[in-house]
Image (cartoon, grey):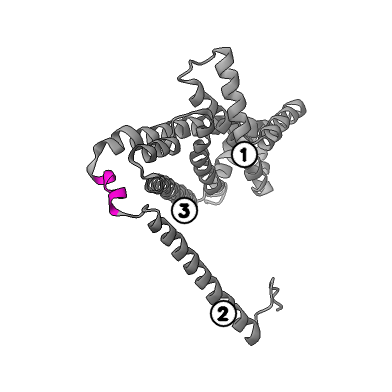
Amino acid sequence: MSTSVLFDAPGPRARRRHAILSVFGVLLVVATGYIVVRKMQDANQLQGFMWKPFVTDRSVWRDYLLIGLWGTLKAAVISIALAIAFGLLFGLGRLSSIRPIRWASGVVVEFFRAVPVLIMMIASYGYYSRSGVFSSETAPLAGVVTGLTLYNGSVIAELVRSGVHSLPKGQSEAGLSIGLTESQTLRSIQLPQAITAMLPALIGQFVVILKDSALGYSITYGELLIWSKTLGSAFANTLPAYIVAALLFILINFTLTVIASRVQRRLSRRGRTTVREAAAVPAPAEAGSAG
């Protein structure tokens, strides 16, 4: 029985070369980190008094960081909800058996996937500001949400389409064999399985939405990044303010990833339990077997 591998196992000379390159890479990273830390120390950015306001002054959190964090979470939550609705709608449209709907959905999805998020934010903000659809206070938030929804919703639509196509063909055949139509089979059988399978990629897209909300900085939306800059200007500790903002982003993304992992495990466990329960049901006795 032959075994195929992508790469040949390295020989003694290759292993020695890899070890040397690894040591060199570690030394390069350490040297770079030392230079960065030394430069920050020379600029007094790592002194204790730079970090003191974060633990002694409540206004740092009340008047800056928490306001920015609320702005980031608000834009992200609204965008995630609308992007899911957009993605499911146009994802199902791309899977429709009606050719005009499938073609129109494909044009919409491919167009908004190709346009950068920042351009859509700026264009939406400009339109909302001139047309008066939203007030001057709400227009920046609406611009951020519009850009994030259109781009990430298009990505989610593609995830839905690829997730359904990745399922075994027998899933759709089973639905049709019991009398379901193609649309009923798609909604009742294929789509739930596809969503469970694409959950990791879907959560990854939610993390992208959360991080891309920082692009609202360009249209004056008050999110965490812009408030961190304001905090750094007010307390003359710009670098520590950005570091704290980065830690908050990491904490939120990590929490989102943990929640997604638990949801995926629960869905997988539910599926296995359902299969075991179905297998435990005794088969009905054949007619005429008695007597």
Quick check: 174 left or right of 83? right
Q: Residue at horizontal 44%, vertical 34%? A: 223
Please state which of the two labelled residues, at mark 2 or mark 3, is closer to the viewer: 2
Question: Secondary structure under badge 1?
Answer: helix
Q: Name the residue under label 3.
A: 276
- Residue 105 spot, x, y in % from top left: 70, 30
Residue at left 41%, top 56%? 40
Q: Name the disc covering residue 19, or none.
A: 2
Residue type, numbered disc 1 = Val
User: Relative to the observer, which residue lies in front, 133 or 78?
Assistant: 133
Marks 1 and 3 close (CB-CB < 8 Å): no
Left or right: where 37 falls relative to 201: left
Residue wearing tag 1: 155
Q: Residues within 10 Å of mark 2 (few under 14, many from 20)?
A: few
Q: Farthest residue toward the bottom?
A: 12
Earlier residue among tags 1 and 3: 1
Q: Magenta segment range?
A: 48-55
